[in-house]
Amino acid sequence: MPDRAPQPVDRQLPTDEARDLISLVRDIAQHEIAPKAAEEEDSGHFPRDVFALLSESGLLGLPYDSEYGGGDQPYEVYLQVLEELATARMTVGLGVSVHSLSCHALAHYGTKEQQVEHLPAMLGGGLLGAYCLSEPSSGSDAASMRTKAVRDGDDWVLTGTKAWITHGGVADFYTVFARSGGEGTRGITAFLVPGDAEGLSAAVPEKKMGLKGSPTAQIHLDGVRISDDRRLGDEGQGFAIALSALDSGRLGIAACAIGVAQAALDEAVAYATGREQFGRRIADFQGLRFMLADMATQIEAGRALYLAAARLRDAGRPFSKQAAMAKLLCTDAAMKVTTDAVQVLGGYGYTADFPVERYMREAKVLQIVEGTNQIQRMVIARHLAGPDSR
């Protein structure tokens, strides 16, 4: 059975421009993304054509400066666009979030010359990016990375392996973090590496539980030579740049989580109001009604939290703690809501004829990417009680 169209969310948006933008996104989601989602996820097809359309429509650079081809949109609006895209298909919503994450270092730490040269193509020229921080032996402990960046005259030579890279093998550019100095957080530098650089290659994509249409692969850097004008920020500033990007990226994951949860709720409500047992709609049984009510409440709470964090960011105020809270709460809610949606549909929920089993598989990874939810709890606790004194 094909995926049902999601019920529109009644959004509070700050401007008429934002309302028009959401209307455009919903039109693309309904006509270009959702109809092919189940089939393409099942076959593992990456929808590069959809990302090309989003780029042409100005949707790949929404939170960035219009001077370089961005959309000048506040995070409050950008995140709701991500939610709409993720409701239609997680591969697309997450892909846009990762692309935005990969542009962060250049947009916020690059020189004016670097931004003029590269950002327009990245934000609206059809290019797609990837963010390379994790490695096979350094995930949560990113500061222990082993990928090396060695200075050679006016060039840098990068050698090592990055892991769990969304868009690995299909990206046009990679924001790569590598060790250019000593141990610890101060010896890491960020680089902008073209996808066709000599010595850069991608491994066979991982075989994942969900998000099968989104390629995740190791990236091998075998003596990749790039000029110093592709270094982003100062030498040794890379770890701070990476953390800055992740604060914003975690809000993107939170919005995507609420998107997939909303899709699961829409499907559960549609099924419960259309299915009869014992001579009445199953939506009329109190046990199921309470389950639907709890699902809706978790979604609204998550949406309110990620928007509150976004408004702090838009106001230029600290938002790291709230970003961690939003990522934690929204992704845990998505896991609970999608699991409950499978329960509402009963045996049908466990089949691929309905999309809720796919939503449940997709929700799981959101509790892991861009900092596991255990890491989010550590971040929140650090803000409350200071660093661990041990």
Image: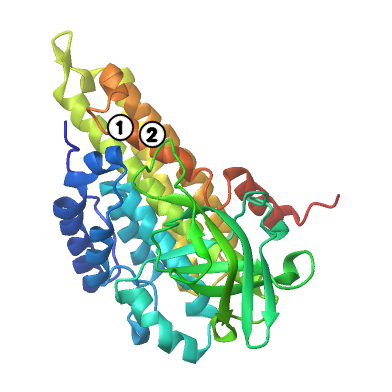
Cα gap from disc 2 to disc 1, whole angstroms: 6 Å
> Which label number is shown at residue 135?
none
Which x, y percent locates residue 45?
A: 29, 47
Percent across and percent down for residue 44 are 32, 43
Q: Nearer the viewer, residue 199 or 96?
A: 199
Which residue bears the numbered disc 2?
Answer: 360
Label 1 residue SS: helix
Q: Residue at x 40, y 60 (%)?
A: 97
From this view, report whether residue 220 is shown above or below residue 265: below
* Total numbered labels placed on residues in the image: 2
Based on the displayed image, in which of its 4 quarters is residue 285 positioned? Answer: top left
Q: Give the image location of residue 209, x and y in percent.
A: 43, 35
Callout 2: SS: helix
Residue farthest toward the top in the current orientation of the protein: 278
Residue at the extreme bottom of the image, as rendered: 113
- How far from the left and from the top, in percent, is residue 385? 74, 53
User: In the rendered structure, which amino acid carries the disc numbered 1?
Assistant: Val
Picture colour scheme: rainbow
At x 28%, y 23%, the residue is 351
Are circles 2 and 1 on residues that touch, CB within 8 Å?
A: yes
Quadrant that contains the N terminus: top left
Q: Amino acid at mark 2?
A: Met
Q: Residue at x 22, y 65 (%)?
A: 53
Mark 2 burial class by Cα count in 10 Å: few <14, some 14-19, many 20+: many
Residue 202 placement, left or right of 233: left
Most distant residue in the right direction: 390
Q: Which of the labelled discs sits on residue 356, or is there none? A: 1
Q: Nearer the viewer, residue 211 or 372?
A: 211
- Residue 65 seen in this snapshot: no
